[in-house]
């Protein structure tokens, strides 16, 4: 699991209230049928980046282009850890990259949208590219939950836990509809202007290799992995109440898998501290510390 860097100049910045939000775009004629497909066809060859936003009439859209296929070596370490701990929930789910990743993302977006979840709409698709909608509204962009958590952490434990709970509740909504995410990191949960949490980034599909309870347990561990360092440093005991309250809605199979993961990961809380060991090591250590507290012996 790799929740990415928390500091980035390219990340969406937090908007503080309506007064500081950008003015709505002037209304323009909506794209005509077929415009999306034509825009994808003509723009894709000109786009250098793997993912980029564009303006199409009054809309902001995102174009994803197929990149090179991913190799399997990058997954060997995670597979070794999962095997050592005997935890299928940590087994890597390869992102195939290339045209396969485009097909997977389009399929998953359509499936999650069909059950009423807030995900980007698939506007146009071809083998090597995908055009999807933006989750902003009236010219106002969505805000990445990762950004909101960072700002809440600076405000204090109460604010942090309130924002962290929003992520827990958002994942619970997905699971209540017998669905699952792909990488349920805080960077892939976004608050839309109307306050609804949306979901992005679906280039892999855990359901192709794991049963539903494993996929859902993986969502919880992914979210915890991306937020554990903040929570562990702020208010781990208070966070336990939120965790167990929300997980009370999960199936018995999911709760059992998380309890097993907590037990088998306990020794990882003794991983060395310090930046010299890398941020991922510190994240895993924080997850193990929290799970050890929350699940006891």
Image (tube, rainbow, N blue to C red):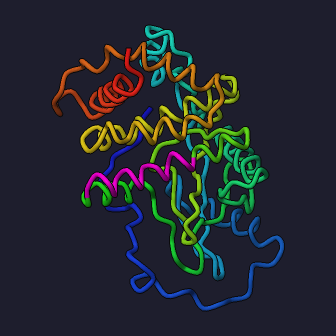
Can you give x and y, in whole percent of width and height, for residue 213 in the image? Answer: 65, 26
Quadrant of residue 153 within the rendered picture: bottom left
Point out the stretch of residues depicted in magenta: 156-170
Looking at the image, residue 20 sits to the left or right of residue 245; the answer is: left
Looking at the figure, which quarter contains the C terminus? top left
293 left or right, relative to 103: left
Please identify the dominant SS of the magenta region: helix
Q: Residue at x 65, y 45 (%)?
A: 174
Can residue 93 be seen here? The reply is yes
Quadrant where the image shows the N terminus: top left
Give left or right: position of 280 versus 202: left
Q: Is residue 8 visible to us here?
A: no
Nearest the viewer among 245 and 175 is 245
Left or right: 259 with respect to 284?
right
Q: Position of residue 66 (x, y in %)?
A: 61, 46
Residue under the image location 55 percent in, 30 percent down: 218
Please determine whether, in this image, residue 190 is positioned above or below residue 111. below
Residue at the location (44% across, 56% down)?
145
Q: Per the image, is 187 magenta?
A: no
Q: Residue furthest bottom?
A: 26
Q: In the rendered image, which quarter is residue 247 located in?
A: top right
Name the residue rendered at 51%, 66% in the picture. 142
x and y percent of residue 46 in the render?
Answer: 57, 63
Residue 92, percent from left and from top: 53, 24
Question: How many numbered callouts?
Answer: 0
Q: Is residue 162 magenta?
A: yes
Image quadrant of residue 195? bottom right
Front one among 213 and 108: 213
């Amino acid at each position: 699991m790799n929740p990415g860097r928390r500091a980035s100049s390219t990340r969406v910045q937090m908007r503080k209230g309506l007064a500081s939000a950008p003015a709505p775009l002037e209304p323009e004629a909506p794209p005509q049928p077929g415009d999306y497909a034509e825009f994808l066809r003509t723009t894709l060859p000109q786009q250098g980046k793997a993912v980029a936003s564009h303006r199409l009439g009054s809309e902001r859209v995102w174009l994803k282009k197929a990149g090179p296929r991913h190799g399997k070596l990058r997954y060997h370490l995670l597979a070794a850890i999962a095997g050592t701990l005997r935890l299928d929930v940590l087994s890597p789910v390869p992102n195939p990259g290339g045209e396969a990743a485009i097909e997977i993302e389009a399929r998953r977006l359509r499936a999650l949208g069909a059950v009423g979840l807030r995900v980007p709409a698939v506007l146009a698709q071809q083998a090597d590219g995908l055009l999807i909608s933006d989750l902003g509204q009236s010219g106002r962009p969505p805000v990445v939950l990762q950004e909101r958590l960072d700002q809440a952490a600076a405000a204090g434990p109460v604010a942090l836990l309130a924002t962290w709970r929003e992520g827990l509740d958002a994942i619970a909504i997905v699971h209540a509809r017998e669905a699952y995410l792909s990488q349920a990191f805080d960077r892939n949960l976004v608050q839309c202007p109307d306050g609804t949490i949306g979901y992005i980034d679906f280039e892999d599909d855990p359901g192709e290799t794991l049963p539903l309870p494993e996929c859902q347990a993986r969502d919880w561990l992914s979210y915890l992995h991306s937020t554990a360092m903040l929570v562990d440093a702020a208010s781990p005991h208070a966070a336990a109440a939120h965790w167990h309250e929300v997980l009370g809605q999960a199936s018995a199979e999911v709760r059992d898998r998380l309890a097993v993961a907590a037990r088998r990961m306990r020794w990882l809380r003794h991983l060395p501290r310090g930046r010299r060991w890398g941020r991922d090591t510190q994240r895993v250590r924080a997850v193990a510390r929290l799970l050890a507290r929350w699940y006891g012996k």
